Amino acid sequence: MVRPHTMHGIARYVHQLVEWFSRFDTPHQFFPLVQEDSPFLERSWPSHVHCTVLQSPWISFREQWNLPRLLKALNIDLFHAPSFVAPLFCPCKMIMTIHDLNHIVLPQYYTPLHQFYYSTVVNRSIKRSEFLLTVSEFSKNEIVSKLRVVPEKIQVTYNGVSELYKPIQNKDWLQYVRELYELPAKFLFCLANNKPHKNVQQLVRAYAYSKIEIPLVLAGPANADLIRLADYYGKKHQLFFVRFIEEEHLPAVYSLCHLFIYPSSYEGFGLPPLEALACGAPVVVANSSSLPEVVQDNAMFMNPFDMREIAATLQFALGQIETGNRFKEKGILHARKFSWKTMAENTLKVYERCVE
């Protein structure tokens, strides 16, 4: 579901999918299903893209009733569920994108209703699907081992990096973005929400424990627990929170930061580290799940469960930066290998295999 100010994760995947389908010269007709507040409705699309409002709350019983009826009314040949939202009774062929298996690996973070939905609707839809798409070999292996799906049914279509993400050299624009978000002269940057697996609390604990004097900037609203944690170590004054960062400003923030940190313990792909690399930022990531696969040898790695190792890795990384960012040019070239256009092309090939 794409809504205003939610252009991250699955929302970004969906946006790029529809955006590139709209650019392709294709005989196919596409019907993105959207909510009434979707930004898709605010722009005009070419004649082969028809944004259609689905009058149902996301993940609801009403959605299970309305979605099949709408698909039938539109005479759809293939339904693509780009997240876990899928109809139990689909009147046409179907494929799903499974970005990760958070709901299985980390069930303690989901409500009983969500667990019921995943265990019934999602599992049934997986069996019903012609193919499953996923965003990394790591996630493919997870699906094979935990959901007992044969590998031949799963297609890996890597996420991409938008052309927007590149090193920003314009000093006036950099200064504008710095002042807009009240960013310090030097700062470490972490772009992640407060979901437990994002591991931000562990990062703040490690940062506060370390001897680092450069401020840590977290994207998101101020968090009282994190402030108290930093205060305990006497670093409350070095912890900064910034409001939602508009995507057009993110490349400048990445370009300004002294070091980008991504401590997440579980990711199906992990797009922010790749976007940071594309902007020339030095990157430190957790050595877990898909992250080593995605960034390869273009970042420094840390154990996300070991506070002292995180602190030591950050200190070492900052020392390396002082003598030059040896990852910069190599990281920029690596990030360019990941293309949303390629992702959309590969996805369209799967569509065509299904309806042939």
Image: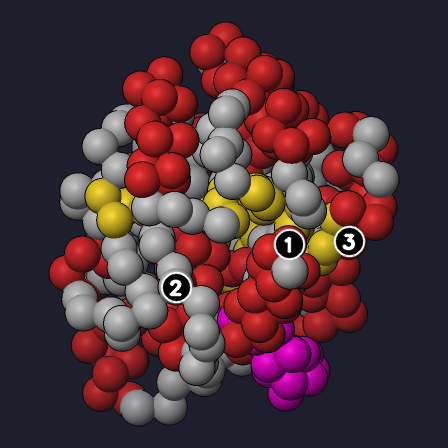
Of 324 and 271, nearer the camera is: 271
Q: Quadrant of the N terminus?
A: top left
Residue 344 in the image: state x and y as whole percent: 54, 68
Q: In front: 155, or 284? A: 155
Q: Quadrant location of residue 36? A: top left
Residue 198 can be seen, yes or no = yes
Q: Nearer the viewer, residue 336 or 242?
A: 336
Kind of residue at badge 1: Cys
Q: Which residue is mark 2?
A: 29
Reading the chain from its start, which is encountered first: label 3 or label 1? 3
Residue at image point 57% right, 43% down? 93
Q: Is residue 4 left or right of residue 286?
A: left
Labels 1 and 2: the sequence-earlier one? 2
Relative image position of residue 17 (x, y in whole percent): 45, 63
Is 157 contained in the magenta span? no
First to last magenta residue range? 325-340
Q: Amino acid at mark 3?
A: Glu
Q: Residues within 10 Å of mark 2 (few under 14, many from 20)?
A: some
**Which residue corresponds to the image point at 27% horizontal and 74% vertical from the top-left?**
46
**Element marked by disc 2:** loop
Q: Amino acid at mark 2?
A: Gln
| Relative height, residue 60 to residue 160 (above, below) | above
Q: Which mark is residue 354?
A: 1
> Circle 1: is it few (<14), some (14-19), or many (20+) Cα within 10 Å?
some
Is 14 rendered above or below residue 167?
A: above
Q: Which mark is residue 137?
A: 3
Q: Secondary structure at mark 1?
A: helix
